[in-house]
Amino acid sequence: MNIVLDTNILQKEGLHSANMSLLCRLSRESEVFVYIPEIVKREYLSQIDFKLRSKQTVGNSSELTKFYKDNHSVLKRIARAENYVNALYIRNKEASEIVFKNWLDENSFVVRLIDKNDYKRVLDAYFDGTRGFRSVKHRPDFPDAFIYESINNIKEEEGGVVAVIGDGPFKNLVKERLNVSCFDSLSSLMEEKQIKEKIANLDNSERLFKILCHRLIITKPSAHRVGPQNGSRVAIV
């Protein structure tokens, strides 16, 4: 099963929610193949970037600079504080990008890059109000239009795809125009019959593995050697 995640799903669930953890488990075991469109990845990271910028500020530094324009000692302190905050922002931004990349790699998620042909299709659809656009020249639909093309490309290349989209109108558009199965949340996807069967099979396999390991430990044969002084037999487990 090929699964595509939309931006709002990734933003809502984050990287470690219960349902996302289930999806990661299925992907690691090659029970499903999960795709993250490039535009979704970039929107997700831009949201983190926005949060970092909003939290790491030195108040209104321009106003402070004006107020203390004649106090060189204070101005130097403000400059040092700004440099520290900027450096901290850069480190946190780089760290968040590394964490996201590692998360993708560890769970075998694939980032679906924008195809060069997608740009022309999206531009043509913008003027026609077709494909990923809900109406003619509807600029807010540009991100969705690229996600639409990713879903369509995966469907054509892999023979089928399931989309998880939290935006109701866009979900209905994809469902109707691409004729693919769509879910509005990861929780609804996890209730799908095929997914539930895959999870049950993984649980059974894991349970059987633990039982076998336990039996091997219990039935492990003992070896004996002669004690160094009194000749007694010493068991080695």
Image (cartoon, grey):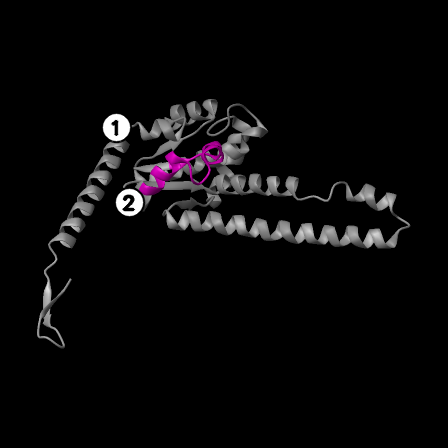
Give the labeled residue for mark 2.
Answer: 30
Magenta segment boundaries in residue numbering: 4-25
Q: Residue 81 placed where, x, y %? A: 73, 51
Q: Quadrant of the N terminus?
A: top left
Magenta: main secondary structure equals helix
The extreme front residue here reads: 230
The residue closer to the viewer here, 14 or 123, is: 14
Above or below for 114 versus 181? below
Q: Say the numbered circle drawn on residue 99.
A: none
Q: Residue at horizontal 10%, vertical 75%?
A: 230
- Which of the two labelled residues, at mark 2 and mark 1, occupies the earlier sequence position? 2
Of residues 26 and 72, the one nearer the viewer is: 72
Q: CA distance from mark 2 to mark 1?
A: 17 Å
Q: Does the magenta-highlighted stretch encompass residue 6? A: yes
Residue that carries the numbered disc 1 in the rendered image: 193
Residue 170 left/right relative to 161: right
Residue 180 in view in this figure: no
Q: Indicate left or right for 210 with 30 as reference.
A: left
Q: What kind of residue is marked 1? A: Lys
Q: Residue at x 61, y 40 (%)?
A: 50
Image spot of residue 23 (x, y percent)? 35, 38
Q: Residues within 10 Å of mark 1 (few under 14, many from 20)?
A: few
Q: Magenta stretch: residue 18 in it? A: yes
User: In this view of the protein, can residue 52 be seen by the observer?
Assistant: yes
Q: Which of 196/133 is in front?
A: 196
Q: Return the x and y of residue 102 as percentages of the image width and height.
A: 44, 51
